[in-house]
Amino acid sequence: MTCNNSSHPSSSEGTNINYRSVDVAIGVLIFSTFPVALLLNGVAGWVSLHLRSTSTFIVYLKNLVASDLLMTLTYPLLAASKLPGAAVGLQMFACRYSDVVFYTSLYTSIALMGLISLDRFFKIVRPCGKAFGQNLTFSLVSSTIVWLVLFGGTAIPTMVLTNQSPDHDAEDLCMSMKGPIAISFHKYVIFFMELFFWLLLVLIVFCYFCITVKVLKSFRTSGSSNSQGKKKTKLRVFSVLLVFSVCFVPLHVARIPFTEHEVVADKTCSAVWLNAVHNFVLWLSTTNACLDPLLYIYLCREYREKLLHMMTASGICTTFHSD
């Protein structure tokens, strides 16, 4: 990668080319992800509307589908605003509204995945009937709190505070739309979300570790030699952790140093590399919207059966139905 240590990449043709090529590549990747994510989440939304909220898991699943679908709808604007030559009006709208919705929906999905993990922990490791954390009221209230806190506490204030006239000559148009208070709020939100993510990751790993130990212990206690069942349990746990780790961990490893460069408007050579890495892991996070619907099929029997029933009723899956 061609780069120099100039504080302004506009003074380096090589650096400009790097920024443009990275933005074009990421824009194309996000555009390519959009139709797949829209199809899968559209189907997931269609199925979830026909599922009765008879369990806490279904309540969390429906909210997760809604957040993933909302996030998916922001992909075209997210991609278009990154392309070289994008209209200033489009970039301003993305900075103030659609990008904010994207990130807030992303963290809503992360929080709901944490609630799903906790729900499975209660049901498998600490089965207490209708005890705390295992009733519909708790799931409805906790899901509502997640939406209110994240959108009311971060998204709306960010939209309100991003109200400055943009500096067209600034390297980062979004940051030029923020006053001192907005920049400070932006920084604190990033740090809060970073801490929130890592704590949630620890919780999810703990929950699924306990679930795996509990299920394997039950196999040993019953004297079962069902190796297929043990393998299936491990694969389910591994698939959730794999999707969560691949989609979200890289973004949060890169997020803090990227924000530091962003806030202080550092445009040195290292910032060019950091921008490229951040954009790539940002695209990785968008693939979560494609992978979550596949996890629903793999992990949720009610969802799988309802999807098969609806496909059969519509004539899409007649061959499979006849087997």
Image: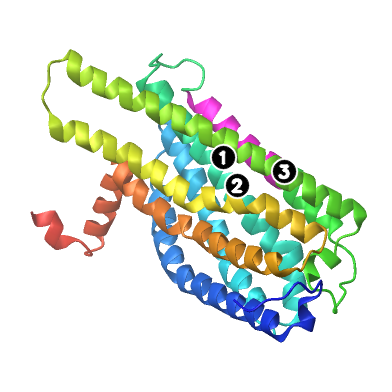
Q: Nearer the viewer, mark 1 or mark 3?
A: 3
Identify the mark at residue 107; answer none if there is no mark: 2
Identify which residue is drawn at 45% across, 71% down: 35
Q: Amino acid at mark 2?
A: Tyr
Q: Quadrant of the N terminus?
A: bottom right
**Which residue position holds label 3?**
191
Q: Is residue 317 magenta-colored? A: no
Residue 149 shown left or right of residue 59 in the figure: right
User: Is mark 1 in CB contact (under 8 Å) with mark 3?
Assistant: no
Q: How crowded is the residue under tag 1: few (<14 C-alpha within 10 Å), some, or many (20+)?
A: many
Q: Main secondary structure of the magenta part?
A: helix
Stretch of the chain drawn in magenta: 135-152
In the image, residue 84 sits, relative to residue 171, either above or below, namely: below
User: Is mark 2 in CB contact (under 8 Å) with mark 1?
Assistant: yes
Q: Amino acid at mark 1?
A: Ala
**Which residue position holds label 1?**
111
Q: Is residue 150 magenta-colored? A: yes
> Element type at marker 3?
helix
